[in-house]
Image: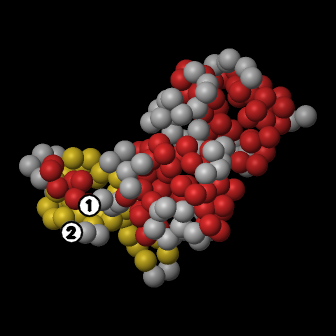
Amino acid sequence: MIEFIRGYVDYVCPEYVVIENNGVGYQIFTPNPFSFQMNKQQQIVVYTYQYVREDVLALYGFHTRQERMLFAKLLQVSGIGPKGALAILAAGQLEQLVEAIEAENDQFLCKFPGVGKKTARQMILDLKGKLQAIVPDAFPNLFTEPLEETNALSEAIEALKALGYADKEIQKVVPMLRQERLSTEGYIKLALQKLLK
């Protein structure tokens, strides 16, 4: 997996951008390639997502890790592929997207290209409650918990995933964890106590 590519913008077109790094040009599909055009003279970092299927090997690139994480989450939604996820992110309204999912606002979600009522409902079903752990730093005002608590809780959730717990199991204990103000370690211990009962 390629975490990021640091280099210079060599070429920009409506679908992708080419980043030159040590004499190699990387074709990277992005939500809005022209957003990279103003950086032609300076070195930039593009956070990448490597998409592999039997007939496709492509790099998708983003300005921030949060954008990339949202892209990866969108790919998990049935009915949304890479092009659809890029189209959703191209609007540049990430905070509104997350708010709409959390508020179950399918009317807003249907405004994105290729997203109908069914896909919007699927996005809400698959992603509601799962984006807080991914984007607390990007949107600190979006969720009600204080930032320190959110960071500690999100780190604990990631640690539980690393320990092999499924999202479904973790989501059962998250409401209980939100009622506490603990360190990351404290959240992990409490979660494990609840999960092992």
User: Which residue in the structure is indicated by mark 2?
Assistant: 13
Farthest-out residue, right: 197
Q: What element carries label 2?
A: loop
Q: Which residue is rendered at x = 30% and y = 51% of the image?
A: 46
Query: Marks 2 and 1: in contact by CB < 8 Å?
Result: yes
Q: Which colour scheme is used?
A: secondary structure
Question: Which residue, given by chain and number where applicable, does mark 1 sit on?
Answer: 33
Residue 164: x, y in percent? 71, 46
Front-most of residues 29 and 155: 29
Q: Is residue 189 visible?
A: no
Is residue 16 visible to the viewer in this orientation of the structure? yes
Compare residues 78 and 55 and report the one nearer the observer. 78
Q: Residue 61 carries which label?
A: none
What residue is at 69 percent from the left and 56 percent from the top? 125
Give the left or right position of residue 132, taking residue 87 as reference. right
**Secondary structure found at label 1:** helix
Kind of residue at disc 1: Pro
- Residue at position x 62%, y 44% from top? 102
Residue 17, how many percent across, how many down?
Answer: 24, 63
Q: Which of 49 and 67 is in front in this view?
A: 67
Q: Is 196 or 148 nearer to us in this picture?
A: 148
For badge 2, the amino acid type reads Cys
Residue 118: image quadrant is bottom right
Q: Residue furthest left?
A: 41
Measured from the top left, where is residue 47 in percent x and y?
35, 50
Pointer 1 or 2: first along the chain: 2
Above or below 21: residue 102: above
* Label 2 Cα crowd, 10 Å radius (few <14 / some 14-19 / many 20+): few
